[in-house]
Image (cartoon, grey):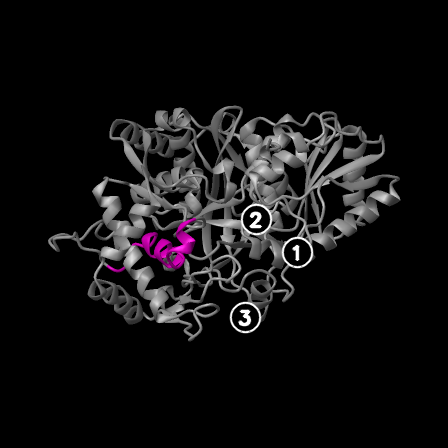
């Protein structure tokens, strides 16, 4: 008789010792990524083990290094469930991440675990460990699971050790949230309050469709908005299939695809081409991406979508080049025109078709609100999400403030770049993530005033944090240092968050992504933020204002 998986687990897992900490490491679903990133994870775990030993604690891995696969990550939901079945449910538990991770690999086990929980990441841009930890934090917040969180460049730093010892004693770590103010405590100016209410009433009266090309990208539980929370805002999902996107892509003629490519080159975009499709960007990859761009717009029109999100990462990655070039074009007002199948109409003419990368539906709702608020205020309507990838002081000394590296995994709208399309380039996506290649839409974000925001789910309701910031211009050498410390194929934004420190943002933020949009001036950016806050409030979201305006004035 066949033995079931459950029979292989212990009925009564061994009780953890009093001064023992159990560690789990959630990884990618893609073997190549887990293998490439494992050395950084191992180094971080060694550092954690040493600091715990000095405090009199033993660090015990709950799952082994897998020699055949050449990594030590939990690499699937099933594996995660099996690992947690053998963990003492009252043990002190650390989820340690130096890499991007799929939260659903460990979510089931974390929800049933009863002991103190700490999510932890090293402060490094090498791999998206901070991004992975923030995604897990957002997923836990959505699920209602309490957690503590911690990060640091140097695990021997006294402040890091102090916070770690606090968690070892009490199971909790408090982070400074003095920068956060509920909207209910900040009376809104009459004009912005009225505009926000009007835009909310318009959306709820004439409802919008969010086109979703397969949910749940890369295990991002936090990125899925339950229908019962989304519908009261006036937004409804059209659940689309990536199989349909693949089919429609193949129906687009070569002539139409070459028209898109020619348009991009006339605008000045540069393609970094090579000959080996396994490691370099090729003409064939770009051609397929141009076909996918036309296909995505036509499918959106077919279903009357106001915005769309392509999952891409799983399934489609084995059939087509990456969707990133497509996504960046969609989010730009000035983009290659797409005609209806009969050639009689230009679809979504003279406007973006907002795209929420990686099917992050929270960012999708945010992007839709941003588009409408900025259009009403005659501000730039281009918006995108970025990963909260990393940050550092400006080593060139040009900027005194702490400068974040906001970096999205492949594309941003060229309207955000220095020199627009002329400042845009396309490089092959890293092979460990993207076996079929495909070009990015890369550039350096131009200096200017931004509104940043995040929609998230907590306490079974939609919430939104908003803040003000600026994008600064750094010398070429400093920009390259930051790119080389992260992923140089991807677009970068040098961001400063007004009135919000590094640790305040990390302690508060409940998502791997942050939404950004430009405004023409500081005053107009303040107005856009307040109008969007009013709109979100009228739609039923609980809204929080974070930090200050440009010159330190509170809300």
Instruction: Please provide the residue range marked out in magenta.
Output: 315-336
Sequence-earlier tag: 3 or 2:
2
- The question of residue 318 being in magenta is answered with yes
In the picture, residue 12 is in which quadrant?
top right
Residue 272 shown left or right of residue 506 in the figure: left
For disc 1, the marked residue is: 70
The residue positioned 55% from the left and 46% from the top of the image is: 498
Kindly indicate whether the residue at mark 1 contacts the one at mark 3 (C-beta within 8 angstroms): no
Sequence-earlier tag: 1 or 2:
2
For disc 2, the marked residue is: 28
In the picture, residue 336 is in which quadrant?
bottom left
Kindly indicate whether the residue at mark 2 contacts the one at mark 1 (C-beta within 8 angstroms): no
**Residue nearest the observer in this picture, 82 or 5:** 5
For disc 3, the marked residue is: 476
In the picture, residue 77 is in which quadrant?
top right
Task: Select label 1 or label 2 by which is in front.
Answer: 1
- SS under mark 1: loop
User: Taking the image as drawn, is residue 403 in sight?
Assistant: no
Task: Select label 3 or label 1 by which is in front.
Answer: 1
- The question of residue 470 being in magenta is answered with no
Q: CA distance from mark 3 to mark 1?
A: 37 Å
Q: Residues within 10 Å of mark 1 (few under 14, many from 20)?
A: some
Relative to 192, does residue 256 appear above or below in the rendering?
Answer: below
- SS under mark 3: helix
Sequence-earlier tag: 3 or 1:
1
């Amino acid at each position: 008789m066949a033995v079931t998986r459950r029979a292989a687990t212990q009925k009564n897992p061994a009780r953890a010792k009093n001064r023992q900490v159990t560690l789990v490491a959630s990884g990618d679903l893609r073997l190549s990524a887990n293998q490439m990133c494992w050395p950084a994870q191992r180094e971080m775990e060694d550092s954690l083990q040493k600091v715990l030993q000095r405090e009199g604690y033993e660090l015990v891995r709950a799952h082994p290094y897998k020699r055949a696969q050449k990594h030590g990550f939990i690499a699937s939901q099933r594996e995660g469930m099996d690992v947690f079945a053998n963990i003492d449910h009252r043990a002190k538990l650390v989820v340690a991440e130096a890499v991007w991770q799929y939260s659903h690999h460990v979510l089931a086990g974390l929800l049933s675990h009863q002991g103190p929980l700490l999510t932890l990441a090293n402060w490094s841009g090498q791999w998206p460990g901070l991004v992975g930890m923030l995604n897990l934090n957002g997923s836990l917040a959505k699920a209602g699971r309490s957690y503590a969180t911690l990060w640091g460049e140097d695990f021997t730093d006294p402040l890091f050790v102090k916070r770690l010892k606090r968690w070892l004693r009490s199971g909790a770590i408090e982070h400074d949230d003095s920068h956060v103010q509920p909207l209910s405590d900040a009376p809104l100016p009459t004009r912005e309050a009225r505009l926000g209410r009007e835009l909310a009433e318009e959306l709820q009266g004439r409802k919008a469709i969010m086109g979703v090309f397969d949910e749940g990208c890369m295990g991002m539980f936090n990125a899925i908005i339950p229908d019962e929370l989304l519908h009261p805002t006036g937004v409804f999902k059209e659940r689309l299939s990536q199989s349909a996107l693949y089919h429609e892509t193949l129906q687009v003629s070569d002539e139409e695809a070459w028209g898109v490519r020619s348009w991009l080159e006339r605008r000045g975009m540069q393609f970094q081409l090579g000959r080996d499709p396994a490691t370099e960007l090729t003409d064939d990859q770009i051609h397929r991406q141009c076909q996918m761009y036309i296909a995505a717009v036509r499918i959106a029109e077919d279903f009357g979508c106001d915005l769309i999100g392509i999952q891409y990462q799983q399934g489609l990655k084995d059939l087509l080049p990456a969707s990133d070039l497509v996504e960046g074009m969609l989010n730009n007002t000035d983009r290659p025109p797409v005609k209806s199948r009969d050639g009689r109409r230009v679809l979504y003419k003279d406007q973006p078709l907002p795209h929420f990368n990686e099917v992050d539906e929270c960012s999708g709702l945010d992007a839709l609100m941003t588009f409408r608020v900025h259009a009403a205020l005659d501000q730039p309507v281009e918006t995108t999400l970025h990963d909260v990838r990393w940050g550092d002081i400006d080593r060139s000394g040009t900027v005194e403030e702490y400068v974040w590296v906001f970096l999205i995994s492949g594309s941003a709208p060229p309207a955000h770049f220095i020199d627009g399309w002329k400042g845009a380039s396309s490089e092959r996506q890293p092979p460990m993530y993207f076996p079929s290649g495909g070009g990015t839409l890369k550039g350096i974000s131009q200096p200017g005033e931004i509104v940043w925001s995040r929609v998230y789910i907590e306490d079974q309701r939609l919430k939104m944090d908003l803040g003000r910031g600026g994008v600064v211009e750094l010398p070429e050498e400093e920009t390259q240092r930051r790119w080389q410390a992260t992923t140089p194929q991807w677009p970068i934004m040098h961001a400063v968050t007004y009135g919000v420190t590094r640790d305040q943002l990390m302690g508060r933020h409940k998502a791997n992504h942050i939404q950004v949009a430009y405004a023409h001036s500081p005053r107009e950016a303040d107005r856009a933020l307040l109008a969007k806050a009013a709109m979100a409030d009228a739609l039923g979201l609980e809204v929080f204002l974070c930090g200050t305006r440009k010159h330190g004035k509170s809300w």
